[in-house]
Image (cartoon, rainbow, N blue to C red):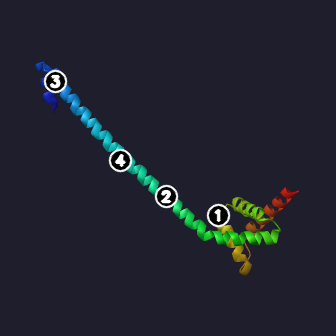
Amino acid sequence: MRMQEVETIGTQGGTDAASQELSDEWQASDAAQYRAVGSLLEGQTASRQTEDLRHEVDGLRQALRTHPLIDTARGIVMATGSCSEEEAWQVLVDVSQCTNIKLREIAQRLVDSITGPPPSRPIKLAFQAALDRMRAGRT
């Protein structure tokens, strides 16, 4: 319905039927817009959920790839630090947090140091400090 028709209806005295018709059109339009926005939001939610799932799968794949490496590094810490699996894990976490280097990178550097060059001085110092804290926590 056009604006001129609305003005004409208002001046002709047929306002009840015309305004009901106009109201019905607006309600239908509002309902259609509501459905469209709802569909859009559902699509965004589904897209967001899909993206979240992809991110989670990527993280799980990374964990599967690095798990053996981290287990090897934990074994090295257990052997050199005379500690349990849990203590070795905590040492690796401590070193990672103190050096601000991802744990898998710390593990890689530690494993590489067996046949290659030793870890950098900051990493060595962080390992020593973490082992000292772990031993101090035992007593």
Mark 3 residue element: helix
Residue density around tag 1, few if under 14, some if 14–19, many if 20 or more, within 10 Å: some
Q: Which amino acid does label 1 sit on?
A: Lys
Residue bearing the label numbered 2 = 53
Mark 3 vs mark 4: in front: 3
Dot placed on the residue nearer the N-terminal end, 3 or 4 = 3
When the figure is inspected, residue 7 is found, relative to residue 79, above or below; the finding is above
User: Which quadrant of the figure has residue 67?
Assistant: bottom right
Residue bearing the label numbered 3 = 17
Residue bearing the label numbered 1 = 102
Dot placed on the residue nearer the N-terminal end, 4 or 2 = 4
Residue density around tag 4, few if under 14, some if 14–19, many if 20 or more, within 10 Å: few
Q: How far apart are the two marked residues, 3 and 1, measured between alpha carbons?
A: 71 Å
Residue bearing the label numbered 4 = 40
Q: How far apart are the two marked residues, 2 and 3, measured between alpha carbons?
A: 53 Å
User: Which quadrant of the figure has residue 74?
Assistant: bottom right
Dot placed on the residue nearer the N-terminal end, 2 or 3 = 3
Q: Where is residue 13 in the image (x, y as percent from the top left)?
A: 13, 18
Residue density around tag 3, few if under 14, some if 14–19, many if 20 or more, within 10 Å: few
| Labelled pair 4, 2 in contact (Cβ < 8 Å) | no
Left or right: residue 92 compared with residue 2: right
For the C terminus, give its image quadrant: bottom right
For the N terminus, give its image quadrant: top left
Q: What residue type is labelled 3?
A: Ala
Q: What residue type is labelled 2?
A: Leu
Q: What residue type is labelled 4?
A: Leu
Left or right: residue 33 compared with residue 16: right
Q: Where is residue 41 in the image (x, y as percent from the top left)?
A: 38, 46
Mark 1 residue element: loop
| Labelled pair 4, 1 in contact (Cβ < 8 Å) | no
Q: Nearer the viewer, residue 104 or 18?
A: 18
